[in-house]
Image (spheres, rainbow, N blue to C red):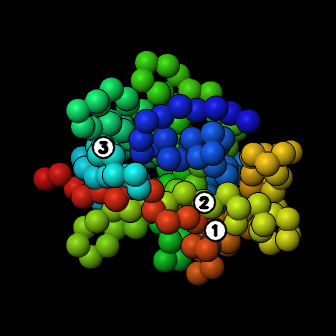
């Protein structure tokens, strides 16, 4: 199990219960087409589910990826993170495939794969980010609804190993949202 230390934002992604959230061995959206989402580009400010403020700056790259620079805000602001993202639309769902690159001044080592993040931008321009619910994913793997593995012990990591076609079909289905927890971050674009 990987231990990842963050103070906010992607901390919620990578430090839940001191272990990694569910990962996929293939990025979600591979068969549907991975493409940068221009609606994300720019600076966003918001709070995480614990009320801690932060900034996300999404920068599109020439290789089709997006870099997210996440910076803690507030009086004790000292933490920052960099993640590489790919994005896809599958049915009504928008998904980020996140790979953490840096925490503060240290490169990250993470389990192989990407962390799927469900994101939504509502009619008022509010961006919400939600992680996969580890309990729901483990139950889906155990029931055979999704191909994957679960590590041993209470905190064993869930790894979704479904092939790209099956993975995209799952994430395009309306029921996919049931595999995600409540949003961990709510943001508004800074103009």
Instruction: Identify whether 39 is placed above or below 26.
Output: below
> Sequence-wise, which precedes: disc 3 or disc 1?
3
Query: Which image quarter: residue 68?
Result: top left
Whole-percent x, y for residue 159 in the image: 75, 50
Whole-percent x, y for residue 130 in the image: 49, 60
Whole-percent x, y for residue 8 in the image: 41, 41
Q: Residues within 10 Å of mark 2 (few under 14, many from 20)?
A: many
Could you say whether the residue bearing mark 1 is in a helix, strand or loop?
helix
Q: Residue furthest bottom?
A: 174
Instruction: Identify whether 33 is placed above or below 23.
Output: below
Labelled pair 3, 2 in contact (Cβ < 8 Å): no
Which residue matches tag 3?
54
Q: Residues within 10 Å of mark 3 (few under 14, many from 20)?
A: many
In three-dimensional space, the C-alpha distance between marks 1 and 2, rounded to whole angstroms, equals: 6 Å
Determine if residue 182 is in view: yes
Which residue matches tag 2?
132
Q: Residues within 10 Å of mark 1 (few under 14, many from 20)?
A: some
Q: Residue at x 76, y 60 (%)?
A: 138
Q: Residue furthest top?
A: 105
Q: Residue at x 77, y 68 (%)?
A: 140
Instruction: Identify whether 161 is placed above or below 108.
Output: below
Q: Nearer the viewer, residue 144 or 92?
A: 144
> Sequence-wise, which precedes: disc 3 or disc 2?
3
Question: Is residue 9 toward the left or the right of residue 108 in the image?
Answer: left
In three-dimensional space, the C-alpha distance between marks 3 and 2, rounded to whole angstroms, equals: 21 Å
């Amino acid at each position: 199990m990987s231990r990842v230390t963050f103070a906010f934002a992607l901390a919620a992604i990578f430090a839940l219960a001191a272990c990694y959230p569910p990962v996929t061995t293939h990025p979600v959206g591979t068969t549907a087409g991975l493409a940068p989402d221009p609606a994300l580009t720019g600076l966003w400010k918001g709070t995480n589910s614990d009320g801690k403020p932060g900034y996300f700056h999404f920068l599109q790259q020439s290789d089709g990826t997006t870099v997210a620079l996440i910076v803690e805000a507030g009086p004790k602001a000292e933490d920052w993170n960099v993640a590489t993202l790919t994005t896809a639309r599958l049915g009504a769902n928008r998904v980020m495939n996140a790979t953490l690159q840096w925490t503060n001044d240290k490169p990250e080592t993470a389990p192989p794969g990407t962390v799927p993040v469900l994101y939504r931008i509502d009619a008022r321009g509010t961006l919400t980010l939600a992680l996969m619910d580890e309990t729901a994913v483990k139950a889906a793997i155990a029931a055979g609804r999704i191909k994957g593995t679960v590590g041993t012990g209470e905190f064993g990591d869930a790894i979704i190993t479904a092939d790209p076609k099956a993975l995209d079909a799952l994430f395009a289905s309306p029921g996919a949202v049931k595999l995600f927890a409540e949003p961990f971050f709510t943001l508004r674009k800074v103009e």
